[in-house]
Amino acid sequence: MSWSEGRLVEVRRRLHRHPELSTQERETAAFIAAELRAMGLEPREGLDGAPTGVVAVIEGGQEGPTLAWRADTDALPIEEETGAQYASCNPGVMHACGHDVHTTVGLGIAAALVEARGSLRGRVKVIFQPAEEGAPGSGLAGAEAMVAGGVLEGPAVEGIFALHCMPSLPVGRIGYSLGPVWAGSDAWRLTVRGRQTHGAYPQEGIDPIYVAAQIVVALQGIPGRVIDAREACVVSVGRIEAGEAFNVIPAEARMIGLVRTLDEGVRVRALEALGRLIEGICAAHGAQAELTTSQGARAVINDPALVGRALGALRAEVGADRVEVSPPQMGAEDFASFSRRVPGAYFMLGVGNRERGIVHPIHSPRFDVDEACLPLAVRAFTRALLEVSGGWPAVGG
């Protein structure tokens, strides 16, 4: 039976009170599986490499394609400051990215599709994915681990959908893109090795802090100087550390940062420029550089045909004037592990409400949502899945 608005709010708040970090979503996975069983489904708990993932298949009453809906389930290491009655009970852990909403919507869609099985062509695989927030270089996790575990097979998925909370978008609205949605993410780590000396005699050593400072400034020239200003590129330094004493120039300085791009060619050029600038600056000052990069999430690029198939249903459900083009985000999301293998359609869900003070961005300790987004999302995307299932071409078709 479809879930009421009250039931959706209850589930979202239950999840919000009990957040779990990436790869630790055991209670969350158990709760999801129990809810799916209560719908009469047979969830599969755990896949190779993703033991806290949950998957269930809703079989339709007619022949048709295999579509998928993906919801991420993990929380962030953030101390909540909302003061809400349903605030996190786990110190230092918070659903500050809206994954509690994503999971609730996924469960609500599953319940609605079970009720509407007679109208569903083919089947919908509901995927509850852990570890979306994993940092680049932290090992195979999240979406990539689920793909490696076979989540897109048995039966083979032909199109996959997902959404993300967007507090800058007012509640009642849905955003879409026919191209890039989220940036690809690369992490980099640099050690600049110089030669230690007394702070009063810098000429007798090689100052890695001075060299590192030159690198920080030079890297800001990659966007707009190396990369065309019309092509999206962000290069940021997230941490720099060196030394222990006020009067000693240390032997080395360490830095970490990121590169974000929306295009693979731009990504390659940006990383090449990163290495070239670092090597050149270090060589000019007699220092040595040790640079490593780790590719994280790939850029999420929507399949225009799949998005187009869904737009009619979304407009019919929430109003044509409430479905709008959403600009690409330079944040990263690992949905591309799915959408670079099968057609993907990723949407933005409006959750903001300025009148109620619900304006804080994701990853903020004060992030919250207008819960009116829950029934709207369930209705709109259930309808979209039902309509797309009626005409989406089979693989190879």
Image: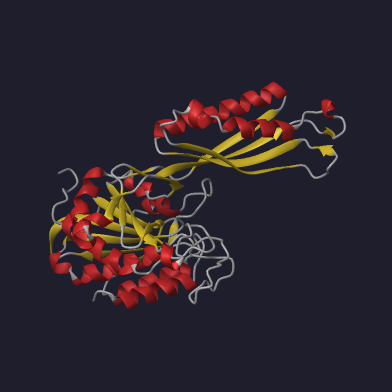
Measuring 83% from the left and 29% from the top, which residue is drawn there? 202
Q: Position of residue 79 (x, y in %)?
A: 58, 65
Q: Position of residue 200 (x, y in %)?
A: 87, 33
Dividing the picture into quarters, in which one does residue 356 lie?
bottom left
Q: In the picture provided, is 351 more to the left or to the right than 311?
A: right
Q: In the picture provided, is 13 more to the left or to the right than 106?
A: right
Q: In the picture provided, is 282 more to the left or to the right than 180?
A: right
Above or below for 180 versus 200:
below
Q: Position of residue 2 (x, y in %)?
A: 25, 74
Instruction: Name the outermost residue toward the left.
Output: 62
Measuring 53% from the left and 49% from the top, which residue is drawn there? 138
Residue 205, can we see it?
A: yes
Measuring 45% from the left and 34% from the top, which residue is drawn there? 267
Residue nearest the observer in this picture, 329 or 153: 329
Q: How many marks?
A: 0
Dividing the picture into quarters, in which one does residue 162 lie?
bottom left
Instruction: Name the outermost residue toward the top.
Output: 284
Above or below for 314 versus 195:
below
Above or below for 151 versus 305:
below
Dividing the picture into quarters, in which one does residue 122 lie?
bottom left
Q: In the picture provided, is 381 more to the left or to the right than 197?
A: left
Residue nearest the observer in this picture, 353 or 43: 353
Quarter the N terminus occupies: bottom left
Residue 43, can we see it?
A: no
Measuring 33% from the left and 43% from the top, which residue is drawn there? 340
Quarter the C terminus occupies: top left
Q: Position of residue 231 (x, y in %)?
A: 41, 33
